[in-house]
Image (spheres, helix red, strand yellow):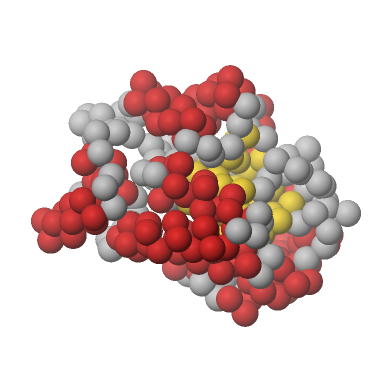
Amino acid sequence: MTLKLDWMRGCATALVTPFRKDGSVDDAVFQKLVERQVKGGVRILVPCGTTGESATMDEAERLHVIRMTVEVAKRMKAHVIAGTGSNNTAATIDFTRKAREAGADAALVVAPYYNKPTQEGMFAHFSEVAKSVREMPIMLYNVPSRTSSNISAETTLRLAEKFDNIVATKEASGNFSQIMEIIHRRPKNFRVFSGDDATTVPLISIGADGLVSVCANEIPKETSKMVEHALNGSFHFARKIHYKILPLMEANFIEASPAPCKFVMKEMGLCEENIRLPLVPVTKATQDKLRAIVKETKL
């Protein structure tokens, strides 16, 4: 039976990683941003994911960011799901163990990218991770737009049935038929999180358990309230927030994330816009669109 984790429900934030102009991680700003999340109602923190630019961080930097997140989370009674996945199974296992030692409560393990494994390869990859780090709860991360490979509903359900420490999936496929099949056939205690801000309310209405959010970096209070209302069945209030912040949720992906989000956060005075290559800051045209949305939503 799937391990029951009562805390794995609600709004989680895929944390941005603030960088200084020289490219180094800005520890002081990062800690303030994490504290702001918890004060805004977010109780699940997700460092070193796509939004955190983990692909351009070395292992020491990623472990450092996870440790900083854990430090704030322990102090403020939140939980940490650390991004540990890669397209190398052995490396994923090794780093998942290190994240566990660093104090993370669970691991977010992305589908292997670039290699383009078959569904059997996908199943074997996640099986090895689950078997090798049995004490670590695992959230699968399905984001075909980034990885060029989809974790099918059948593979997700096979993994959920076989391994009690595979406890959830972050579904960013945009395939509602696939997500509905997972929700409908999942084992007891297995959680399904939306991986897209804009699809959260409809997915919760059909049984999803929460959101791993980009938008919450900018507006944690509004995003966490939207999720809370939806989970409580107060869809009138959830929809009201949804449509208010929808322009921002969509604008965060005008260009490759997290560049738009970092620009908005810079406009809000939260952090610098610095981003690591090969990503670059947003264009002037996108800046104008984002400024208009910031003004419209009164950020």
Question: Could you tell me residue 116's position as x and y percent?
Answer: 53, 69
Q: Is residue 179 left or right of residue 22?
A: right
Residue 32 visible to the viewer: yes
Residue at left offset 63%, top offset 76%: 178
Q: Is residue 115 left or right of residue 152?
A: left
292 in relation to 137, above or below: below
Question: Could you tell me residue 285's position as x and y percent?
Answer: 12, 61
Q: How many marks?
A: 0
68 in relation to 291, above or below: above
Question: Could you tell me residue 264's position as x and y percent?
Answer: 26, 46
Quadrant the C terminus occupies:
top left
- Farthest residue in the left direction? 284
Which quadrant of the figure has residue 154?
bottom right
- Farthest residue in the right direction? 1
Q: Is residue 285 left or right of residue 99?
A: left
Residue 23 visible to the viewer: no
Q: Is residue 86 left or right of residue 105?
A: left
- The residue nearer to you, when weighing 54 against 294, is 294
Question: Could you tell me residue 265's position as x and y percent?
Answer: 28, 41
Residue at left offset 44%, top offset 47%: 222
Residue at left offset 31%, top offset 49%: 261
